[in-house]
């Protein structure tokens, strides 16, 4: 079994044991080796199995709601998320939509740049480039992009995960742009545009190039993107990535 601190090895191992289902791979993790966060880590595999057995989305699937809260709560992420995210991504390729999208959304929450907590709220690691949970999610970007290529319904949720990892924009911005160009109105192109806007300079440059027919990507949509970014709460003294994306896009679109 894989103890804490080995998310990269676990993700790689899971990716190359395709004959084993994602649920069976829950047995590969030593859950007891992880500190308590928002409940006992040993409950995580039970919640995942119950969520899959239920099959419904957030708000209807009690186990899925409990799983999300057990991993991510009030601007922090439990350390046990480290081995969970590769299993959730693999499950997203095995279950039906919309549960697949909900699982990817949880992965996105885990990737957000927040402090990591465990053991009754004790701070485990500050958000840095060495954050093991973000590193685990980053290692799964190829798998997520493959899921999006296979099912366009998952693209907005995958885009939200990608947006949390702007340091990988060189490999992801163009894919999001291609998805946006291929999107129909029901595919939520607004969400894809927001994800592009949050990918930093490279994403902003791609987003600034977006062109749609007048009845599909109207000027008002530009305003919706800008308003969404502007309305993000900011209690920090320095501009956030939302503020920077808003300023950059406003300048790019205003110059057109």
Image (cartoon, rainbow, N blue to C red):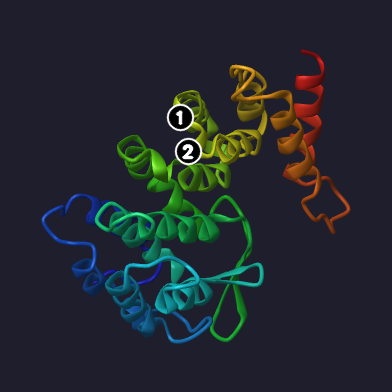
Pinpoint residue 159: horizontal percent, then vertical percent. 51, 42
Q: Residue at x 81, y 32 (%)?
A: 247
> Mark 2 and mark 1 in contact (Cβ < 8 Å)?
yes
SS type, badge 1: helix
Mark 1 or 2, nearer chain start: 1
In the orientation shown, which residue stands out farthest toward the left?
A: 19
| Residue matched to label 2 | 187
SS type, badge 2: helix
Rendered image quadrant of residue 27: bottom left
Pinpoint residue 168: horizontal percent, then vertical percent. 51, 36
| Residue matched to label 1 | 179
Pinpoint residue 17: horizontal percent, then vertical percent. 16, 54
Q: Considering only vertical position in the picture, is 237 above or below 224?
A: below
Q: Residue at x 52, y 29 (%)?
A: 173
Count of picture labels: 2
Q: Considering only vertical position in the picture, is 223 above or below 112?
A: above
């Amino acid at each position: 079994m894989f103890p804490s601190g080995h998310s990269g090895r676990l993700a790689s191992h899971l990716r190359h044991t395709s004959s084993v289902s994602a649920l069976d791979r829950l047995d590969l993790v030593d859950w007891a080796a992880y500190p308590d966060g928002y409940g006992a880590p040993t409950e995580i595999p039970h919640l995942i199995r119950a969520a899959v057995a239920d099959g419904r989305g957030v708000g209807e699937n009690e186990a899925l709601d409990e799983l999300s809260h057990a991993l991510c709560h009030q601007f922090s992420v439990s350390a046990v998320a480290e081995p969970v995210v590769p299993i959730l991504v693999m499950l997203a390729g095995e279950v039906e939509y919309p549960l697949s999208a909900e699982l990817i959304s949880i992965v996105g929450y885990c990737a957000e740049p927040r402090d990591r907590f465990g053991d009754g709220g004790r701070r485990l690691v500050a958000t840095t480039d060495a954050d093991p949970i973000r590193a685990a999610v980053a290692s799964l970007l190829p798998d997520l992009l493959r899921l999006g290529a296979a099912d366009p319904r998952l693209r907005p949720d995958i885009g939200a995960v990608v947006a949390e990892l702007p340091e990988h924009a060189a490999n992801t911005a163009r894919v999001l742009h291609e998805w946006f160009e291929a999107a129909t109105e029901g595919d939520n192109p607004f969400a894809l545009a927001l994800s592009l806007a949050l990918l930093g300079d490279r994403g902003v440059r791609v987003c600034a190039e977006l062109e749609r027919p007048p009845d599909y990507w109207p000027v008002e949509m530009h305003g919706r993107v800008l308003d969404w970014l502007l309305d993000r709460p900011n209690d920090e003294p320095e501009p956030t990535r939302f503020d920077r994306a808003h300023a950059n896009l406003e300048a790019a679109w205003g110059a057109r």
